Amino acid sequence: MSILMTLITAVGLSMDAFSLAIIYGTMNMSKTTNNLMSTMVGIFHFFMPLLGYALGKIVLNIIPVHPDIVVGVIFIALAIEMLFSINKDEPAKLLNNFFSVLIFAFTVSIDSFSVGIAFGALETNIYTSCIIFAMTSFIFTYIGVNLGQKLVNKFGNISTMIGSIILLILGMNYIL
């Protein structure tokens, strides 16, 4: 697999993190949380393809639930929580601790696990691919959060509502 194809794959894998980062950027999280979220997404996009490459076939035979269903349920739950937080005076605290950021990073990185499985059948340098995935997803997440912050400053709570609706649609898309 060429570097160009790996980069195109990395961009595709990073788009869900980017779109969700925009949504979370509308939540006025701290700069530390923004940086932690971007870093964790990058780290997970490095390790998930490695895990898929090494263990994917075994794990998929053991787990009876398709990973997309798990992701869809998590997205829908987050969207509902965001919708309920719109009228609160305090900012939403969806990603207010390390564990919640970890869950977010894991959720947007599950698709790279399946790509790792595919890499097992291809002639590719898995470590180079994982580095490209990590860097691309970090950059996309970081840009997404900052773009979301600009949107909320310009449009207010309406951007959070739109983000919640997008998250609901993404969740339903994963489930269906």
Image (spheres, helix red, strand yellow):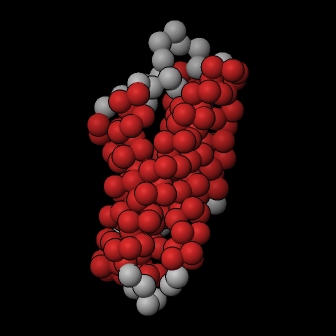
Q: Which residue is drawn at 66% across and 47% down?
A: 169
Q: Could you say which quadrant of the image residue 113 lies in?
A: bottom left
Residue 64 position in % (x across, y down): 40, 70
* Whether residue 157 can be seen here: no
Q: Which of 119 and 132 is in front in this view?
A: 132
Horizontal relation, residue 30 to residue 146: left or right: left
On the rendered image, what quadrant is the C terminus found in? bottom right
Q: How many marks?
A: 0
Residue 174 position in % (x across, y down): 59, 58
Horizontal relation, residue 56 to residue 87: left or right: left
Q: Could you say which quadrant of the image residue 60 lies in?
A: bottom left
Residue 47 position in % (x across, y down): 32, 64
* Whether residue 99 can be seen here: yes
Q: Residue at x 52, y 36 (%)?
A: 145
Q: Which residue is drawn at 45% across and 26% down?
A: 29
Residue 4 position in % (x across, y down): 57, 75
Residue farthest along the top direction in this orientation? 89
Horizontal relation, residue 98 to residue 130: left or right: left
Q: Could you say which quadrant of the image residue 132 lies in?
A: bottom left
Residue 174 lies, with reference to residue 115, above or below; the image says: above
Q: Nearer the viewer, residue 68 or 51?
A: 51
Residue 93 lies, with reference to residue 70, above or below; the image says: above
Residue farthest along the front direction in this orientation? 3
Q: Residue at x 49, y 57 (%)?
A: 136
Residue 37 lies, with reference to residue 161, above or below; the image says: below
